[in-house]
C-alpha cells in the first residue's frame, strides 16, 4: 500500500553540500538570486552530482533534508565559514538555513534549477 504523496518545494544543491546541510554543518546557502517570497517553509534539499547551469537542466538527485529559509541578506565575506565556501564574491545572497530535518530514507527525485515542485 502506497503512502500518500505530498507536493513540496525543492532546491537542488551539489554534493556533498546537501549532506552538510542535513548534518547541520552548513548554515547558509549562497545564491545569485532570491525567491519570490519568504519564508520558505518545508523546502526539500535535493543533493545532485553536477552543477545545473541551464534552465532546462535536470538530473536525478536525492532528497536529503527538509529545511526552512526565513531570511535572506546580502552575503558578506565574514560568512565564508557558515556557507562552507572557498571564496567570497560581491553581489550574492545568503539564505539563512533553519529548522533542519534530515530525511532518513533517501529518496530519488528530480534535481532542477531554481525552486521547483516535487512529490514525495
Image (cartoon, grey):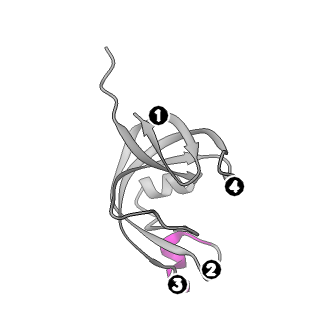
- Indicate which disc residue 53 carries: 4
Residue lying at the far front in this picture: please name it. Answer: 36
Distance of label 2 from label 3 (alpha carbons): 8 Å
Image coordinates of residue 36 in percent, x first then y, are: 43, 63
CB under 8 Å between callouts 1 and 3? Answer: no
- Residue behind mark 1: 107
Residue at (57, 43) in percent of width and height: 111
Decide whether the magenta segment is chiefly helix, strand or loop.
Answer: helix
User: Mark 2 vs mark 3: which is more N-terminal?
Assistant: 3
Distance of label 1 from label 2 (alpha carbons): 32 Å
Residue at (36, 55) in percent of width and height: 67
Mark 1: give few (<14), some (14-19) or many (20+) Cα within 10 Å: few
- Locate the N terminus by quadrant: top left
- Residue behind mark 2: 88
Residue mark closest to the camera, 1 vs 4: 4
CB under 8 Å between callouts 1 and 2? Answer: no
Residue mark closest to the camera, 2 vs 4: 4
Residue 108 vs residue 7, the one in the foreground: 7
Q: Which residues are magenta?
A: 76-85
Mark 2: give few (<14), some (14-19) or many (20+) Cα within 10 Å: some
Mark 4: give few (<14), some (14-19) or many (20+) Cα within 10 Å: few
Image coordinates of residue 54 in percent, x first then y, are: 69, 52
Residue mark closest to the camera, 4 vs 3: 4
CB under 8 Å between callouts 2 and 4? Answer: no
Q: Quarter of the image holding residue 114? A: bottom right
Amino acid at each position: 500500500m502506497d503512502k500518500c504523496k505530498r507536493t513540496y518545494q525543492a532546491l537542488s544543491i551539489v554534493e556533498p553540500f546537501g549532506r552538510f546541510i542535513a548534518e547541520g554543518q552548513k548554515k547558509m546557502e549562497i545564491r545569485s538570486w532570491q525567491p519570490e517570497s519568504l519564508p520558505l517553509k518545508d523546502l526539500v534539499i535535493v543533493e545532485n552530482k553536477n552543477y545545473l547551469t541551464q534552465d532546462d537542466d535536470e538530473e536525478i538527485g536525492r532528497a536529503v533534508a527538509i529545511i526552512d529559509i526565513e531570511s535572506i541578506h546580502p552575503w558578506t565575506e565574514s560568512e565564508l565559514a557558515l556557507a562552507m565556501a572557498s571564496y567570497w564574491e560581491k553581489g550574492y545572497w545568503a539564505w539563512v538555513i533553519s529548522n533542519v530535518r534530515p530525511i532518513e530514507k533517501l529518496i530519488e527525485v528530480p534535481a532542477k534549477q531554481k525552486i521547483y515542485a516535487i512529490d514525495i
